[in-house]
């Protein structure tokens, strides 16, 4: 199967083409400095042209839809939805936390990303399955950490803040790292509805903000 993968959530965006019959990733290109909003569609067109693939030949389009940069998340998801509708191609939306967790080969992992203002995006994964994802305070994160073998982080700031918990610091995930998750879902036709799928922002609801005191 042939897949187009994109991730514009982090400090550097990326696009990849994968062919599972050819061994995996066949093309990949990075977009440094949060330049995805200007370059994303052009990069996708060039990669497809270089590989001599038509858009309609794709098995699926996979997009990492957050959490992450507000603008980056919207740019990637909007492009993926537009291409999916234009080509009649199934869409797979993948959590950035799930991709980060997949980079650490442990039975249970808590993937952690900086959310600013002393909060974190956190996701607990057990043997590849998502148990839960949430926007949490540092105190809430430490409680979540009791459920897992280790924490996976890709930001030095987060690694330093959680130093005593001994998190595993890995490189920032790219679009190519979403291949395993996307392939697994494509095989069983676990696709997302293009009309209803939204960005994975993990915001707190008003009820949570006003009804529950922050854990310190």
Image (cartoon, rainbow, N blue to C red):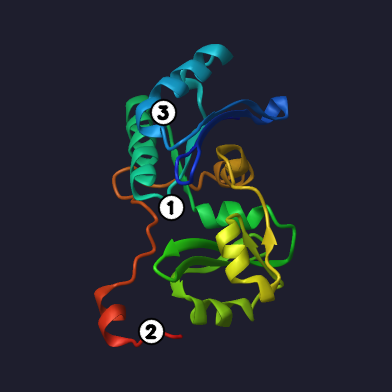
- Whole-percent x and y of residue 114? 49, 61
The residue that label 3 is drawn on is 40
The numbered dot on residue 118 is none
Q: Residues within 10 Å of mark 1 (few under 14, many from 20)?
A: many
Position of residue 91 relative to residue 101, above or below, is: above
Instruction: Pinpoint residue 45: horizontal percent, then vertical percent.
Output: 44, 18
Q: Nearer the viewer, residue 31 or 124?
A: 31
Q: Is residue 121 above or below residue 88?
A: below
Query: Which residue, given by chain and number where applicable, does mark 1 sit on?
Result: 68
Which mark is first along the chain, 1 or 2? 1
Q: Quadrant of the N terminus?
A: top right
Question: How far apart, in angstroms, are the residues tagged by discs 2 and 1?
Answer: 22 Å
Tell me the CA gap for discs 3 and 2.
Answer: 38 Å
* Mark 2 element type: loop
The residue identified by callout 2 is 214
Between the residue at mark 1 and the residue at mark 3, the CA separation in whole angstroms equals 17 Å
Q: Quadrant of residue 156?
A: bottom right
Q: Position of residue 121 (x, y in %)?
A: 47, 65
- Whether the residues at callouts 3 and 2 have beta carbons within 8 Å, the answer is no
- Identify the residue at horizontal 37%, vertical 41% (top origin): 77
Vertical order, 155 against 59 (above or below): below
Earlier in the chain: of badge 1 and badge 3, it is 3
Q: Nearer the viewer, mark 3 or mark 2?
A: 2
Q: Sort mark 2 into few (<14), some (14-19) or many (20+) by Cα contacts within 10 Å.
A: few
């Amino acid at each position: 199967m042939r897949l187009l993968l994109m991730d514009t959530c982090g400090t550097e965006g990326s696009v990849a083409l994968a062919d599972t019959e050819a061994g995996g990733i066949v093309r990949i290109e990075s977009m440094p400095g949060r330049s995805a909003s200007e370059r994303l569609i052009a990069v996708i067109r060039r990669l497809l042209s270089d590989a001599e693939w038509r858009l309609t030949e794709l098995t699926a389009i996979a997009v990492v839809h957050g959490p992450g940069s507000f603008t980056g998340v919207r740019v990637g998801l909007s492009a993926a939805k537009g291409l999916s509708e234009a080509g009649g191609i199934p869409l797979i939306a993948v959590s950035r936390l799930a991709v980060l967790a997949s980079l650490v080969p442990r039975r249970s992992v808590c993937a952690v990303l900086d959310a600013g203002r002393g909060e974190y995006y956190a996701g607990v994964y057990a043997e590849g399955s998502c148990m839960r994802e949430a926007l949490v305070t540092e105190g809430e994160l430490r409680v979540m950490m009791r459920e897992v073998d280790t924490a996976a982080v890709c930001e030095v700031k987060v690694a330093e803040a959680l130093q005593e918990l001994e998190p595993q610091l890995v490189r920032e995930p790219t679009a190519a790292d979403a291949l395993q998750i996307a392939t697994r879902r494509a095989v069983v036709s676990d696709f997302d509805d293009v009309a209803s799928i939204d960005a994975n922002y993990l915001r707190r609801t008003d009820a949570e903000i006003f009804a529950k005191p922050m854990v310190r």
